[in-house]
Image (tube, grey):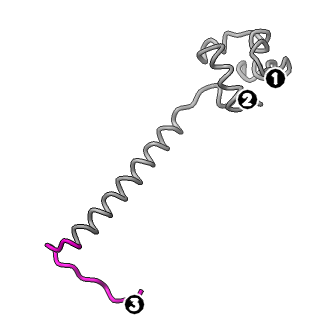
Amino acid sequence: GNGVPVVLSATSQALYLVQRLRDEAHRFAVTYHRKLRAKAQVRSVFDDLPGVGPARKRALLRVFGSARQMRAATVDDIASVPGISRGLAERIRKHLDA
């Protein structure tokens, strides 16, 4: 806070500690960023369905298991999933056909 730089010897234990703190903070930040980037890259057809949040997405995945099976499903198949109304099933089917 006083504007005077702290000069540490190249062999100083204090310098070593500060370098280790810096390196650990950087490692932590890079690991977190990689995790976020990897998570953002994992997407499925279920993520973009209109009116489908996390709970309905889980229900659809439980019933259909995969995007391929979901694309093969009829409106009646989709509407049979708990929490999915007929109207929502029609919107989902329309989205999948687009």
Q: Is residue 11 above or below residue 51?
A: below
Q: Along the horizontal axis of the image, is 50 left or right of 65? A: right
Which residue position holds label 2? 52
Secondary structure mostly taken by the magenta-highlighted segment of the chain: loop
The reply to whether the magenta stretch includes residue 7 is yes
Would you identify the image quadrant in which residue 95 lies?
Answer: top right
Would you identify the image quadrant in which residue 81 lies?
Answer: top right
Q: Which mark is residue 2?
A: 3
Label 2: how many Cα within 10 Å (few below 14, some 14–19, many 20+): some
Q: Is residue 72 above or below residue 36?
A: above
Q: Residue at x 28, y 69 (%)?
A: 18
Query: What is the x, y in percent for residue 20?
Result: 27, 62
Q: Which residues are magenta?
A: 1-14
Label 2 and label 3: CA atoms lie apart by 56 Å
Q: Which mark is residue 88?
A: 1
Q: Residue at x 65, y 24 (%)?
A: 58
Viewer-nearest of labels 2 and 3?
3
Element under label 3?
A: loop
Dot 1 and dot 2 residues touching (CB under 8 Å): yes
Query: What is the x, y in percent for residue 31?
Result: 40, 47
Q: In the rendered structure, which disc, 1 or 3, sits on the residue that comes first in sequence?
A: 3
Query: What is the x, y in percent for residue 2?
Result: 39, 90
Label 1 and label 3: CA atoms lie apart by 64 Å
Q: Residue at x 76, y 22 (%)?
A: 92
The quarter of the image holding the C terminus is: top right
